[in-house]
Amino acid sequence: MTLIRSQKIIIDGYNVIYTDDRLRRIACRDMERAREEFLRVLEDYIKAKDIQVTVVFDGKGGMVEAEAVVPGKLQVVYSATGQSADDLILSVVEESGKARSYMVVTSDRAHIGGMAKRLGCEVLGSKRFLERLLKRTPESSKHRDEKPGQGNIDTDYWLGMFGTDGEGESSN
């Protein structure tokens, strides 16, 4: 079973970080480290997949900033001043003209999730996405023997955090 039907995933980055207790605690002390932890898990997953992932964070100020973490596969984008990550995500999807090829990852179902679904995107909740991502990450088994708090992902901890409530499950 594959994670998604879409070939392009666009993620509300801070929404995912603040959904997870461990990442949220890290973010309270060091937001850059929380972003790095999350991006490391994504990198491990996408190495062997034919997908493109864009993680959108609310901006650093100025114009839209983007950096390729894994060229052609993983991109991190910061929204411009006065533009929310939600607005940027919806703009990217609308401008693509191919909304059905996108999965939007967010737990904000009332705003961005609903709008993305109306555009034709697949929508998946942040907790569900992380749960599926971590269960299928080839590198996740190597992290089980590493000690938490040393900058590595404690996969057992993360997997224990997620229930099977179907939150944000796609209906497409």
Image (spheres, rainbow, N blue to C red):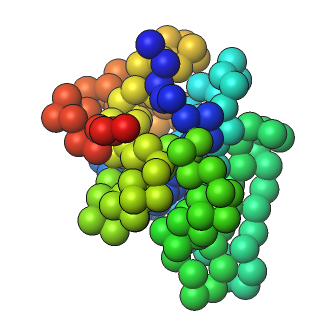
Is 1 located above or below residue 94 in the figure? above
- Give how far across and how far down residue 104 sits, in percent: 48, 50
Q: Hey, which residue is sitting farthest bottom in the picture?
A: 82
How far across and down, in percent of the image, does residue 161 sit?
25, 34
Residue occupying image coordinates x 68% and y 57%: 96
Classify residue 77 as left or right of residue 133.
Answer: right
Residue 156 in which image quadrant: top left
Q: Nearer the viewer, residue 8 or 19?
A: 8
User: Where 70 falls versus 121 (above or below)?
Assistant: above
Quadrant assignment for the C terminus: top left
- Does 117 sit above or below residue 152? below
Q: Quadrant of the N terminus?
A: top left
92 to the left or right of 160 = right
Pinpoint residue 80: horizontal percent, then vertical percent.
66, 79
Q: Position of residue 127 (x, y in %)?
A: 32, 41
Q: Quadrant of residue 69?
A: top right
Q: Which residue is depicted at the point 21% across and 35% down?
A: 166
Depth check: give the residue in front, 161 or 147. Answer: 161
Q: Residue furthest right?
A: 71
- Residue 23 falls left or right of residue 6: left
